[in-house]
Image: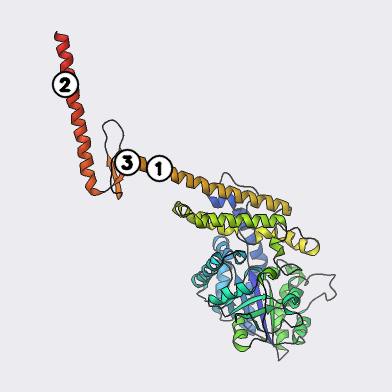
Amino acid sequence: MLITFNFEVHQPHRLNKEINKKGTTLWDRYVDTKLNKEVFNKVANNCYIPANELMLELIDEHDFKVNYSITGVFIEQALEFNDYVLDLFKDLVKTGNVELIAETYHHSLSSLFEDDEEFIEDIERHRELYKDVFNFKANIFRNTELIYNNRIAKVVKDLGFEAIFTEGTEKILDWRSPNYLYQSPDGMKVLLRNYRLSDDIGFRFSARDWDQYPLTADKYAIWLASTPGEVINIYMDYETFGEHHWKETGIFEFLRHLPIEIAKHEHLEVVNVSEVVDRLEPRGEIYVHEFATISWADTERDVSAWLGNKMQRISFEKLKDIGRFIKENEEVKKLNNFDEIYKIYKVLQTSDNLYYQSTKGLSDMSVHNYFSHFDTPFDAYASYLNILYDFEYYIKLQLHKLKNENKNKSVKTKKMGKCRIKKPCKIKHQNSEDIIIYVGDEDIESMQLDIKNNKNKNNDKEDKKDNESKKFIVA
């Protein structure tokens, strides 16, 4: 039995609760950098640093293997707030026992857009980031929140990936087991998360009302050993270690002893995900229509965590409207700060922004509230929509200013006559300040000559007028 341990590493760029009107940049206006820094360093101290240091020990002592999917927005914050965290991930990759799993750069919902352009763009940018930061080429892909359907699988396959991860839910399996390799209708290999064994650690580890509490490493290894199939894919948030379950719960000691307990069962082998794809053959087809898209979120295992209520759907449609406006309007690309505008647009796509707006009940709601920095889903909705409309107004205002600037340049150029626009030329006019216009080299001399001739004509007129005045006085 092959076993893979996979961890999602992500921190969103949390938005301001209220627009910062004193901000000198769009980033300051919309993004709460102070809060993001506080959260990142808190989780770094609780989870990323101790967990990474422990993983390095396990690799060194037990040849342990592990897989990470790390979002682009996480890496951005690590570079800005705590580069030691990133250095530890680099050290892990260099061991050769760590495989990186590709995903969307901005942890976005772009795979749910009507066309695939932005989804592909986000994937390719993430690929480049892995290469630049870790010198690593990922062959396995996981979409944001394991969102999956046939179309998504085909897009990812066409980009050259060997396999894609998604949730091993009964919705797509019926009577079948998640503990095998499958394939999509287009032949894309599909790895399925065993959500029960994953959530035993991710959600239930410190739950004192759980009938299996406390969960120990030897008990968990026995569960793995007694599970039928060919592969068990364990997938959870990396923040499980030290953040979701604090150090005092014993989560790090559980992880420390897990490789030892697994090694006691000879038929268990911990591997990287690419080894699963190379060594196993698909045992059947997974068919998921777009209207039945699945994910690993909430009890429904669908996309209702982000699009389940009217607030979320209004926000999503408005976000797409702004995207279409940016994409279809060529003038936007001519704005001096287009890169900043486009970056903000991408940050607004991060799935967390809509996740905070969920109004689900019971245990699902408690999870949503745990991750949100807003008091209520309604506050999250009001804040997000306010930013969307303010952002849209800003873009249109900048376009209006650009149009006026171009209009003024055109008026000045026409006053000086026809010319080919090539470079700036300063002309000293008799009755005004210097005029800067854009003209060709061959036009400059003739324009200066015209001004000189006009000046001479004016001088002749003044002399004639003075002579006439003298004659009148003499008479």
Tell which of 60 and 229 is nearer to you.
229
Label at residue 456 = none
Amino acid type at image mark 3: Lys
Residue 66 coordinates in the image, percent (x, y): 63, 79
Residue 145 falls in which quadrant of the image? bottom right
Residue 242 falls in which quadrant of the image? bottom right
Q: Give the position of the C terminus as an image quadrant.
A: top left
Q: Earlier in the sequence, mark 3 or mark 2?
A: 3
Q: Determine whether, in the image, residue 313 is placed left or right of residue 402.
A: right
Amino acid type at image mark 1: Lys
| Number of numbered callouts drawn | 3
Q: Earlier in the sequence, mark 3 or mark 1?
A: 1
Amino acid type at image mark 2: Lys
Q: Which residue is mark 1?
A: 407
* Front disc: 3 or 2: 3
Label at residue 464 = 2
Whether pointer 3 and pointer 1 mark residues with C-beta atoms closer than 8 Å, the reply is: no
Q: Is residue 4 visible?
A: yes
Q: Residues within 10 Å of mark 1 (few under 14, many from 20)?
A: few
Q: Determine whether, in the image, residue 337 is placed left or right of residue 263.
A: left
Spatial CA span between label 3 and label 1:
11 Å
Rendered residue at 30%/32% (across/down): 432
Q: Which residue is mark 3?
A: 414
Residue 474 coordinates in the image, percent (x, y): 14, 9
